[in-house]
Image (cartoon, rainbow, N blue to C red):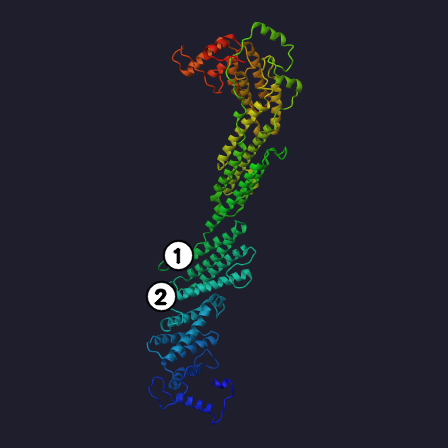
Amino acid sequence: MQVADARAIDTGKASDTMRAICDAVLALAWRCAPGTGSPGEACHWADGYPLNVLLYVSLLQAIFDLKEETVVLDEVDELLELMRRAWQTLGIDKMIHNVCFAWVLFQQYVATGQIEPDLAGAALTVLGDVAADAKQEHRDPVYTQVLSSVLGSIHDWSEKRLLDYHEWYGKGMAATGAGAMVIPLSLALSTSKIIAESVPGMGIDLADSEHDGIGSFAGNRVDHYVRCSMRNAFAKALENELGQGNSMVIQRDDDPSETMARLAKDTEQLAQFELENFSPVLKRWHPFPGASAVATLHSCYGVLLKQYVAKATCLTNELVHVLHAAGRLEKALVPMMVEDVADSDDGGRSLVREVVPYDVDSLVARFLRTWIEERLRVARECLLRSKDTESWIPKSKGEPYARSAVELMKLAKATVDEFFGIPVTARDDMVQNVADGLGAIVQEYISFLASCGTKQSYLPPLPPLTRCNQDSTIIRLWKRAATPCREAGTNPRGRAHHGQSESISGGNNPRPSTSRGTQRLYIRLNTLHYLLSHIQALDKSLSFFSHGGCASPASVSNRQLAPSGRFDRARAAAQSAIVHVAEVAAYRLVFLDSHHSFYGGLYVGGVADARIRPALRALKQNLSLLVSILVDRAQPVAVREVMKASFQGFLIVLLAGGSDRSFTVEDHAMVEEDFRSLKRAFCTRGEGLVSEQVVEAEARAAEGVVALMALTAEQLVEEFGIAAYECTEAVSERQRLPLPPTTRRWSRSEPNTILRVLCHRDDEVASHFLKRTFQLPKRR
């Protein structure tokens, strides 16, 4: 036969080739019949496989009506009996007959369009006999070949449909509805079990199937079909959404958020369709097929969700949309699963364990934390940039505060607005995180604002304690005669008198002496109040939205909402910084900017020659400039601190004025009048910013010191002795008093204050007391 492929066979009678063929045919025709040990008399030339099987199958097909192919002839039993006589000729036995008969019935069922279930039922009945035959130990090799071929064909045909039964039986037509799936499922289970038990090497292991998964062979096979079909159905749903080829991986560059959201809805509908149509059919073999299908869909969508989340770098509305869709899908699928496994023996624990939750809340929380960290990082960069570049020069008179504060508050407001614009419920648990992060940044910025030095740096150093020189009577008379001739602006010791010269040069309208450095401190004050107002607004926004508010953020400021207290630390830091900066600005204004007219000029050379009027004119101009620069909310604190600094400066002039100042009892009336004028400047020029009660309260200490100046030297010595003994708790009057320490807490009853009044008293009694008690030197 192989030679015939190369050249034509010589068919002559004397041909060697024909002679060889004839010998081979005779040997086959007169060989031993199957099951016999010696050649018989009957010719059985057609019993070789597969020819004998093909011929016998053709004979078996004669049992069907030629006109109605789905009908078996009534004479089927007689026909089968006649065919039985050909078994010996064809080398057929009962076992091979059963396999062939099952195949013929199955083939006819398929060929007629699967419209006659009785044919499939008959095939299943015969397969029962085949299963019994296949268990025999000693089987003919030909039978094994026939059995594996027939079972493989039936099994492949059935599984092709079952592995994608949604595509084959999900259309709802009469012959292809969910009910029609019973026949291929029965065929697949029957053939699979026979193969697993009797035909090794075909990929189906009975032992593994019975010990894994559902626990039964049929249940495990059905579970396999359910999962494969659901995966295929999900893949087709994804293909429909993407409009492209088969792929379980999202590879497009554009944002697939809408695809993911729609796919979630399709997945839910697919699960519902499975439970309503296929699960009732499959429960015959599987305890919870619906739950298995739902778990598979849950896993398939989870794979895509994981891919989508892995590509996301930050929290966006699109990502939130997808996560919400995934959360809704999971909430819909889980009850379906729980309901389906409720009646199972173990409650579906094995299935529940394999379901990996989407954990949408954790994903949202993680992305939300990342979003918050990124926004806070941007705000902190703004803070660091402001520390390097802020010049405290306002953008305009309409915005008299630092530009960096405006930028920082814009970022904070945008962060809060965007935070509450993210449509996730997990944000309610992170409101405090946002507040804490922004609060820490604002507090650091407030610390930066408050880093402007201290008031002590502007206080003049206290001169050493000395006693006044006692001039002779002739010198005193000469000084009095020389006073009218003394050049204006020069003190008796030949020094320029700044207060008087300022008055002469400036006239009645001297220019403000506020330096640019002090004006920049005013800008810091404005900035602190700007921050404080925006902290209040941020706090109200957080309170409004965290309590379920749904209005726009811009409308929050128009609502009467109590602050939540989330920015209490920042608010307290701002209040403290306001007082500190106002205090530093006031001391700088009084002791540095106004030094020439106040501490450097007041009462230098004598009270009568250097009254407070020039200093008051400069003060009023400085207060006018202060009010013009500061915002309304900042003015009361600033003016009050200027008042305190002025009173402190007045006391330092009286108590630590140095060698250029000395006082007598007669000077008391002028000093008292000057201090009343100073108080009146704040009551009137302050334009109601400082109440008269506050002025009187702050002036009480200075008034007590001024009252000491009305006392004689003897009275002052007596007052000092009483105060000193009370403070030192001396045991006797003979005990020598120590020099009282300088506390700068000036008051009428404080020993150091009374001592300084004595040091500035131009009186012999005072000088003698200071020399005798403390050995204080005379002024040079």
Residue type at tag 1: Arg
Q: Position of residue 587 (x, y in %)?
A: 55, 24
Q: Residue furthest front?
A: 780
Please rate how many residues cluster around mark 1, counting C-alpha atoms within 10 Å: few if below 14, some from 14 to 19, many from 20.
Answer: few
**Which quadrant of the rendered structure holds the C terminus?**
top right
Relative to 199, say whether 409 is above or below: above
Q: What is the spatial separation of the Cα atoms under label 2 and label 1, in whole angstroms?
A: 20 Å
* Secondary structure found at label 1: helix
Q: Position of residue 735 (x, y in %)?
A: 40, 12
Residue pointed to by mark 2: 210
Task: Give the residue at x 45% y 67%.
Answer: 163
Q: Residue 681 bears which disc, if any?
A: none
* Secondary structure found at label 2: helix
Q: Residue furthest top?
A: 474
Q: Quadrant of residue 472?
A: top right
- Residue sitting nearer the eye, 434 or 479: 479
Task: Give the residue at x 40% y 74%.
Answer: 124
Query: Going from the N terminus, do you reach mark 2 or mark 1 first?
Result: 2
Q: Position of residue 466 (x, y in %)?
A: 51, 14
The reply to whether residue 541 is in sight is yes
In the displayed structure image, the side of residue 666 where residue 27 appears, left or right: left
Relative to 115, say whether 234 is above or below: above
Relative to 67, say whether 397 is above or below: above
Please rate how many residues cluster around mark 2, counting C-alpha atoms within 10 Å: few if below 14, some from 14 to 19, many from 20.
Answer: some
The reply to whether residue 284 is in sight is no
Residue type at tag 2: Glu
Residue pointed to by mark 1: 353
Q: Quadrant of residue 277?
A: bottom left
Q: Position of residue 68 (x, y in %)?
A: 47, 79
Q: Quadrant of residue 143?
A: bottom left
